[in-house]
Image (cartoon, rainbow, N blue to C red):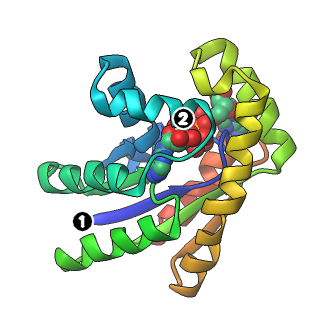
Amino acid sequence: MKYYILFGPPGAGKGTQATAMKENYNLRHVSTGELLRNEIAAGTELGLKAKALIDAGALVPDEVVEGMIESLFNSVKDVNGFLLDGFPRTIAQAEALDAMLAKRGEEVTAVVSIMIPDQMIMERIKHRAAIEGRADDANEDTINNRIKTYHDKTEPLVEYYKKAGKYNEADGIGTIEEVRSRIFGIMDKF
Ligand code: AP5
Ligand code: MG
């Protein structure tokens, strides 16, 4: 199995690019944000707890998302691999992922990072707010907190994966098609 991490700040285009990537490389797309939004929509206990944190632009506890990922690793079989979108998001999650994969005799195949500047994050998320109606897109303070959370908690993963020799970056500025061809150029190496 291949284990790709689709990395990048909020609004960079992870979900957008994942659609083409999963089809082209026969991967199971796993967005922890989407899984959590499904829990909220279903009104589960987990969803209720997650909602307050997501609406504040904070992260949900590491154990919650780690559990979701591990149960998918145990159940999904009929693909070439996984495309992890929005996970890991902290050093602790990255270490947990390494441990989960080591137990299976596997490792992270590659990190594909989509990078855009902060000011473009705000533009793209505001544009999407009108289309998708996500609660965490509706309020400028929430978006700013998501950007801050990204820099504080998630950006250190760039160094973590550079040190591991797994980090690959695609410039996220340009049309969706331009970014996709940069990403495919990276994916084709693995
Ligand atoms: P999550 O759902 O992962 O949100 P995010 O990381 O903030 O990323 P987004 O989904 O907002 O952006 P995206 O990169 O997918 O961009 P998109 O393709 O939609 O997480 C939500 C929350 O859940 C977190 O804040 C946290 O609370 C919690 N959570 C999730 N995972 C967690 C974890 N591991 N640990 C703890 N908590 C977790 O594109 C954005 C817009 O731009 C779209 O409108 C799109 O059409 C447009 N666009 C895309 N590409 C281009 C382009 N090239 N040119 C112009 N427009 C473009
Ligand atoms: Mg997304």
| Label 2–label 1 contact, CB within 8 A | no
Residue at image x 36%, y 29%? 47
Residue for badge 1: 1
Coordinates of residue 147 in the picture (x, y in percent): 73, 46
Q: What residue lies at 59% left-to-right and 44% top-to-bottom?
A: 58
Query: Quarter holding the N terminus?
Result: bottom left
Residue 86 badge: none
Counting from the top left corner in percent of width and height, residue 2 is at 31, 65
| Res 86 seen here | no
What is the residue that sits farthest to the right in this orientation? 119
According to the picture, the residue beneath numbered tag 2 turns out to be 54
Q: Quadrant of residue 178?
A: top right
Mark 2 or mark 1: which comes first in sequence? 1
| Residue name at image x 42 percent, y 28 percent | 37
- Amino acid on which disc 1 is placed: Met
Q: State yes or no: Cβ of the residue under disc 2 lies below 8 Å from any atom of ligand 1.
A: yes
Q: Residues within 10 Å of mark 2 (few under 14, many from 20)?
A: some
133 above or below 62?
A: above
Q: Residues within 10 Å of mark 1 (few under 14, many from 20)?
A: some
